[in-house]
């Protein structure tokens, strides 16, 4: 039954994430937000909704290691698995905002999380509030830069037909997406905990692998479909945005509900270094060789590194 709950939970997360993204993008077009801002904010936040639901549910159930492992594992999966597979299918172009603004912000949040956790072994409500405040500052400057950018109208792979959807459809998508995410997260966490107990694997190992991959499925599906359609504009920015939202909003909101404690030694011992490492490696990959793109070879390197991470997580 544990495996059944996990599979059903994953399916519901995919369905919920899809409906939530469609609703968010449709609403953004209604409000005349630029496509670039949609990609970096609304879509990134929407695809982080599964992580948020899973983390909140886990925290309420007293499994803070699942909440933390989910975010750390999802951030690793977003770069190693999602970005890697997408780059293998179709090379991704990198713009100047990547290394001038978005990548440094992602590194800031990643390193900040490390210091907050290593300080006292937990993420408190005050620290979570600080992450949310920092996210607000990031969004403010992102919107200011977007207004000044000459590339505002470039496509980012978002279906413009969603802009024609009625408000009734958008509200219906939100309801369906929210319900699917709620039940999906509840069943996924429940199944993962039972499975971990049954096979003698720690909840953290399950959360940083199975649950993390499951909650990264919306990003993976969207990126792969865009790559298959040769739509270059679903870019690095969306995945970086998701990683920023995962740390700042998911952990920030979860810690406001309940302190997130470091339960498993692997969190600060190894896995958070993997998260920071995957984030940091993007900069040299962007410039070596100096093409400002991540192509097939670089994608294979990322996927290979991710497979190594998974193998070590289960071997621990």
Image (cartoon, rainbow, N blue to C red):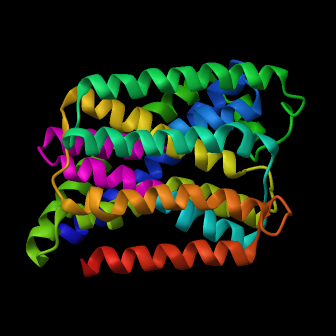
Q: Which residue does the image show at 82% across and 62% down from the upper left? A: 230
Residue 70 is a magenta residue: yes
Residue 5 horizontal/vertical position (percent):
23, 62
**Nearest the camera: 256 or 271?**
271
Q: Which residue does the image show at 48% across and 62% down from the upper left? A: 77
In the image, farthest residue toward the right = 150
Looking at the rendered structure, the number of numbered marks drawn on it comes to: 0
Query: Which image quarter: residue 213?
Result: bottom left
190 to 110, vertically: above or below: below
Residue 58 seen in this snapshot: yes
Quadrant where the N terminus sits is: bottom left
Quadrant where the C terminus sits is: bottom left
* Magenta-drawn stretch, dominant element (helix, strand or loop): helix
Residue 110 horizontal/vertical position (percent):
46, 45
**Nearest the camera: 91 or 104?**
104
* Range of magenta residues: 48-75
**Nearest the camera: 215 or 112?**
112
Query: Which image quarter: residue 38?
Result: top right
216 to 196, vertically: above or below: above
Residue 16 horizontal/vertical position (percent):
44, 46
Q: Which residue does the image show at 25% across and 63% down from the upper left? A: 266
Residue 81 is a magenta residue: no
Residue 144 horizontal/vertical position (percent):
73, 19
313 to 102, vertically: above or below: below
Residue 1 seen in this snapshot: no
């Amino acid at each position: 039954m544990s495996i059944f709950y996990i599979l059903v939970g994953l399916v519901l997360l995919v369905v919920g994430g899809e409906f939530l993204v469609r609703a968010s993008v449709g609403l953004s077009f209604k409000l005349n937000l630029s496509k670039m801002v949609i990609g970096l904010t609304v879509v990134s936040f929407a695809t982080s909704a599964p992580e948020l639901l899973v983390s909140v549910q886990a925290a309420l159930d007293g499994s803070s290691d699942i909440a933390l492992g989910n975010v750390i594992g999802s951030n690793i999966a977003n770069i190693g698995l999602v970005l890697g597979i997408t780059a293998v299918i179709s090379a991704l172009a990198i713009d100047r905002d990547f290394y001038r603004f978005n990548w440094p912000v992602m590194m800031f949040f990643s390193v900040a999380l490390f210091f907050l956790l290593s300080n006292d072994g937990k993420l408190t409500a005050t620290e979570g509030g600080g992450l949310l405040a920092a996210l607000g500052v990031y969004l403010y400057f992102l919107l200011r830069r977007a207004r000044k950018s000459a590339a505002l109208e470039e496509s980012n792979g978002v279906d413009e037909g969603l802009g024609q959807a009625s408000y009734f459809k958008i509200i219906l998508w939100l309801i369906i997406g929210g319900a699917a995410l709620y039940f999906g997260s509840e069943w996924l966490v429940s199944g993962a905990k039972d499975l971990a107990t049954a096979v003698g694997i720690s909840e953290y190992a399950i959360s940083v692998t199975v649950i993390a991959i499951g909650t990264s499925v919306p990003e993976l599906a969207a990126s792969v479909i865009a790559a298959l359609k040769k739509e270059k504009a679903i870019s690095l920015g969306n995945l970086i945005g998701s990683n920023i939202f995962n740390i700042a909003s998911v952990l920030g909101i979860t810690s406001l509900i309940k302190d997130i404690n470091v339960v498993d030694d692997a969190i600060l011992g190894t896995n958070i270094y993997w998260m920071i490492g995957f984030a940091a490696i993007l900069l040299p990959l962007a410039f070596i060789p100096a093409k400002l793109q991540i192509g097939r070879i670089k994608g294979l390197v990322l996927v290979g590194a991710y497979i190594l991470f998974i193998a070590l997580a289960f071997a621990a």
